[in-house]
Image: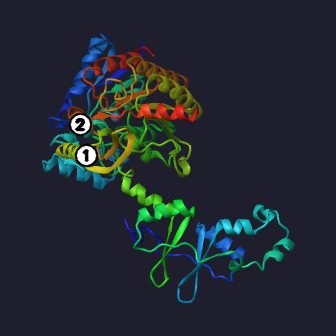
Amino acid sequence: MKRTGYLHDNRYILHDTGPHHPETSDRLLAVYEGIKEEGILEHLTMISASRADLKWIETVHDPVYIRRFEEICLSGHNTFDDPDNCISMDTYESAFLAVGGILDTVDLMMTDKIDNAFCAVRPPGHHAEKDKAMGFCYFNNIAITARYLQEKWGIEKVAIIDIDVHHGNGTQHIFEQDASVFYYSIHEHPSFAYPGTGRDFEVGTLGGHGFTKNSLVLPGQGDDVYYMLIQGDLMPAINKFEPEVILVSTGFDAHRDDEMSDIKVSTQCFSWMMQTIMDLGERHCDGRVISILEGGYSLQRLPELAGNHVKILLDS
Amino acid sequence: MFVSNHMKKTVITVDQDASVFEAQQLMAEKQIRHLPIVDAENRLLAIVTDRDIRSALPYTLLKGSHTDEEKAGLIDLKVKNIMTLDPKSISPMDTIQDALLLIQQHKVGAFPVINEKKELMGILSVRDLLSSFINVLNINEPGTLLCVLVEEKVGQLKKLVDTITEEGISFGSVLVNRHWEEDKRAVFIYLLTNNVVRVKKKITALGFSLLDPMSWYIDNLSQKE
Ligand SMILES: [Zn+2]
């Protein structure tokens, strides 16, 4: 059994998106219930969050943007940059705690206290651009984590695997010129789904050419196409890149019961996908894998999906 | 949607007495495929395209495997020997729709844009048309596409627009395909949001059906075979 960290902090609930928003704090409670239900809580290293140091957030985000975010939260506005992005007074603090908790998790892994981890944070991050909030995301948690691994822990090559059903436009744009961070995303075709980026001809620019890879799934497609693309696109790309750490943008919104997408992935296929990622981690980076929560909105399905997910981390 | 808003206003022209080599070099340097030729009063006389040049030059020259002798023999070939006189042109007050239909009819890659005095005002290429349509479709903005099947009767689109407006969602674009099925239209609504769960439910509750994009994907596949 692996030493698996589980980042869970009640203060992530303080980010209040209002009554009709899909990205709610109930999601984290569903995740917790599912992990508890698996009977594995006692085997996990529980991690609670500390507040991130601003300097790490500034490795990715524009200082003017960060200030704008703080001011709009304090001013009592209820949206930021787009009507999709519902905020409350505490959103800014929650976003700092999300980043801080993940960076603490990285420290535990890099000092060999844990082998891998699941970070159940909100707000999510992969749509956040360096100077713009998008798609319920404010700070790009996973991008900051990659920079932190490089700058604090001297890791050279980080792979980010994004299995959220939406393309992680923010993450791709932040690293698209950078050959030291490989970004892979599998998502619903951008002509149908938010945010409209992540086409298969987007492969990185300048020095980062060849270090971005997008796999597209059409509305209505599911397991078969996922099996094919993960084996045909993701596995060879990671084997070629040989990362030292793998970060996973874990969204559960490709599930067939999740109304946020038209993609029909089964619970079993999610497990297979995570097992495949763990095998890649074992082969290339001593199992150093940190999974960070992005989307996933079906409160009925989140418990089983999160339970299985963490069980795979534990048994990998 | 007037041509004047979408055309390139700085036009690179070429002298009719220039050699074909010079014209070719100019195109390569500026990454363009069409060079209008004007008179001293900036009135449009002709146009020369990269295709005109390619068909005027022997194959060896294009491949770069020519001898200096061959090249010397062609140095006298001038733009005026190969240009198309009085080419098809459009006015700045024509619309983008006009230009689309004309391009389809005349199978050309660009139109010089001239005013009533025949003065050259700009040039509109297929590339400019494409970017104006990308703008109209709004696909550079983040959003989600809804595909709704609508019966052919009055007031249907209004219901959809009202429902989406009630939800406070901004429109990126709306496309209507009138020939979808017998008595049915397909409406493609691009919404500038990530959050379409509620609006989809409301639309279905009104009795509209959402198109399953996979079904037309499969239809297309079977047509190809
Ligand atoms: Zn998502």
Q: Residue at x 22, y 23 (%)?
A: A29
Position of B126 relative to A183 (above/below): below
Q: Amino acid at mark 2?
A: Ile
Q: Amino acid at mark 1?
A: Leu
Identify the mark at residue B157; answer none if there is no mark. 1
Quadrant location, the N terminus of chain B? bottom left
Name the subunit of mark 2: B
Q: Which residue is mark 2?
A: B203
User: Relative to the observer, which residue lies in front, B48 or A240?
Assistant: B48
Left or right, B16 with respect to A189, comes to right
Q: Residues within 10 Å of mark 2 (few under 14, many from 20)?
A: some
Q: CA distance from mark 1 to mark 2?
A: 11 Å
Location of residue B199 in the rendering, given as x and y in whole percent from the top left corner: 23, 38
SS state under label 1: helix
User: Relative to the observer, which residue lies in front, A271 or B68?
Assistant: B68
Q: Residue at x 57, y 89 (%)?
A: B40
Ligand 1 location (quadrant): top left
